[in-house]
């Protein structure tokens, strides 16, 4: 039961992850209850405006029962919330409460919603699948691999894994490859799971890591596509990165000189592991790693899992949800990852010794993009390369706006696979030069080539 004083407090604090105001009961109210049931539960206050004003609602003898019937009949599986009316200074407010539903996802009239921050988010097909598998505590990689048998697995890779696990002392495995994989559920019904195929296959599944060294966004110096089982793929990608990162030597008085790479290698490795362990393997896109003169970007398909947000990732107390449980366990047991859900915390820890390197995370293009940018002073030759890279990037942005006018910054970021913050800097440069303009309302408009500026003759000394 909720007391009237509690209702007054709910009205005072405003809408949130678990609270929404409605001036009247309608279809949107039911959508919000579904969103709450698919997340952490919550309360809908009917008779309260968005700004906290309380006009109240009028109730008949059967109104609350009628509302309950509408909620039950228009949701699947049917949800039955708690509902209660309160008198607030002579006006009636109805509190409708629903707890997190144990079996998800719930839908209303075929549409699925989940509460994120203080709004309802309609789920995509992939998100619906993810939520269902979370509810059943399943993961994609635990399913049996279609058309594969035990002969598809490499005995030597399994034996190497067993030795590493036993040496790491987090778990003890039988020396028999089959018994070890059955114990960890990598083999079910005498068939390999998708996780087993990704980790130990003779012929690796074609989930690539595409790595490249770029002078500019369109000028590739070196390029490689890595197709291997996951442990080996990580090592190969790290070798590529190390071969293309500058290194300085420090002397601290000892006989041995110390190497200092332009970026902290443990942080890069942690970002790499995050991409490999948490990517959406049902997505056919590749992990993409780009090394520029002034930054390294790592893109992995699949947005953050389980409703995790960018804001939460930036804290040291976020709760991680694991998309690929068996893959994550393999990397944990071999001490490639220290603790589930601690990757971004470890990256920030490693960066403390690198004040000249900044780190950014964003969701874009259906996945997660992390960017390491170096702010340190660099040699003249490299400086010229960075300048060329920026100019080439701005030109690429101009071409994109010309070919697809009306796009906004998030859409331009997705088109070019460039972080939104970089796009913002380039947009400012182009607007300062009067080469592009923004047309339309702030929330719906986009960027266009400035045709008037384009047809003006260049003046002497102009850029």
Image (tube, rainbow, N blue to C red):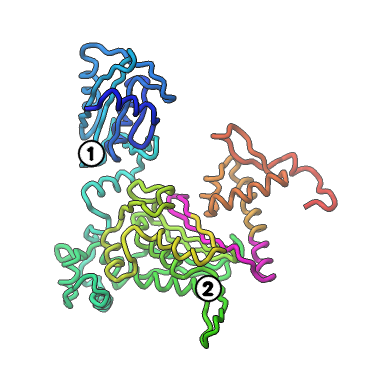
Picture layout, residue 52 above or below residue 320: above
Q: Position of residue 290 (x, y in %)?
A: 52, 63
- Residue 125 versus residue 21: which sits nearer the camera? 21
Q: Is residue 85 magenta?
A: no
Task: Name the residue rendered at 34%, 66% in the picture.
Answer: 337
The 10 Å Cα crowd at callout 1, few under 14, some 14 to 19, many 20 or more, is some
Q: Position of residue 229 (x, y in %)?
A: 34, 70
Task: Name the residue rendered at 55%, 70% in the picture.
Answer: 262
Q: Position of residue 6 (x, y in %)?
A: 30, 27
Looking at the image, the residue that sits furthest to the right is 460
- Residue 257 versus residue 225: which sits nearer the camera? 257
Q: Is 414 on the left-hand or right-hand side of 235?
A: right
Q: Which residue is mark 1?
A: 101
Q: Position of residue 423 (x, y in %)?
A: 59, 50
Q: Is 391 on the left-hand or right-hand side of 29?
A: right
Boundaries of the magenta span:
361-389
For residue 261, the mark is 2
Quadrant of the frame with the N terminus: top left
Q: Is residue 375 magenta?
A: yes
Residue 446 occupies quadrant: top right
Tell me the mark number nearer the camera, choosing from 2 and 1. 2
């Amino acid at each position: 039961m909720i007391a009237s004083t509690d209702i007054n407090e709910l009205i005072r604090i405003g809408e949130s992850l678990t609270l929404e105001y409605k001036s009247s009961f309608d279809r949107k109210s039911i959508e919000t209850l579904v969103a709450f049931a698919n997340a952490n539960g919550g309360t809908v206050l009917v008779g309260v405006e968005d700004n906290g004003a309380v006009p109240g609602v009028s109730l008949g003898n059967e109104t609350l029962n009628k509302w309950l019937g509408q909620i039950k009949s228009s949701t699947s599986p049917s949800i039955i919330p708690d509902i209660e009316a309160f008198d607030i200074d002579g006006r009636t407010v109805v509190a409708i409460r629903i707890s997190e539903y144990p079996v998800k996802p719930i839908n209303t009239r075929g549409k699925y919603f989940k509460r994120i921050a203080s709004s309802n988010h309609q789920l995509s097909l992939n998100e619906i699948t993810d939520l269902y598998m979370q509810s059943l505590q399943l993961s994609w990689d635990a399913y049996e691999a279609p058309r594969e048998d035990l002969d598809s697995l490499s005995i030597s890779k399994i034996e190497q894994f067993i030795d590493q696990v036993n040496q790491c002392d987090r778990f003890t495995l039988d020396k028999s490859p089959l018994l070890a994989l059955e114990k960890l559920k990598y083999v079910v019904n005498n068939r390999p799971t998708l996780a087993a195929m990704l980790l130990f296959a003779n012929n690796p599944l074609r989930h690539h890591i595409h790595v490249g060294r770029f002078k500019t966004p369109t000028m590739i110096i070196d390029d490689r596509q890595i197709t291997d089982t996951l442990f080996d793929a990580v090592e190969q990608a790290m070798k590529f990165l190390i071969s293309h990162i500058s290194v300085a030597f420090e002397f601290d008085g000892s006989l041995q000189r110390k190497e200092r790479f332009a970026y902290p290698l443990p942080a890069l490795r942690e970002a790499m592991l995050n991409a490999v362990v948490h990517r959406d393997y049902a997505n056919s896109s590749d992990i993409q790693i780009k090394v520029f003169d002034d930054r390294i970007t790592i893109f992995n398909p699949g947005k953050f899992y389980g409703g995790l947000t960018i804001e939460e990732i930036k804290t040291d107390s976020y709760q991680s949800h694991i998309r690929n449980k068996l893959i994550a366990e393999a990397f944990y047991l071999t001490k490639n990852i220290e603790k589930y859900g601690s990757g971004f915390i470890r990256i920030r820890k490693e960066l403390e010794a690198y004040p000249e390197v900044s780190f950014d995370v964003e969701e874009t293009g259906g996945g997660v993009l992390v960017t390491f940018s170096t702010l340190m002073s660099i040699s003249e030759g490299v400086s010229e390369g960075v300048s060329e890279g920026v100019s080439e990037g701005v030109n690429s942005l101009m071409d994109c706006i010309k070919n697809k006018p009306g796009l906004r910054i998030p859409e331009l970021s997705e088109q070019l696979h460039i972080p939104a913050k970089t796009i913002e800097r380039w947009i400012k440069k182009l607007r300062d030069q009067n080469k592009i303009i923004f047309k339309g309302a702030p929330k719906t408009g986009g960027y266009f080539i400035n045709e008037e500026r384009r047809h003006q003759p260049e003046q002497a000394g102009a850029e």
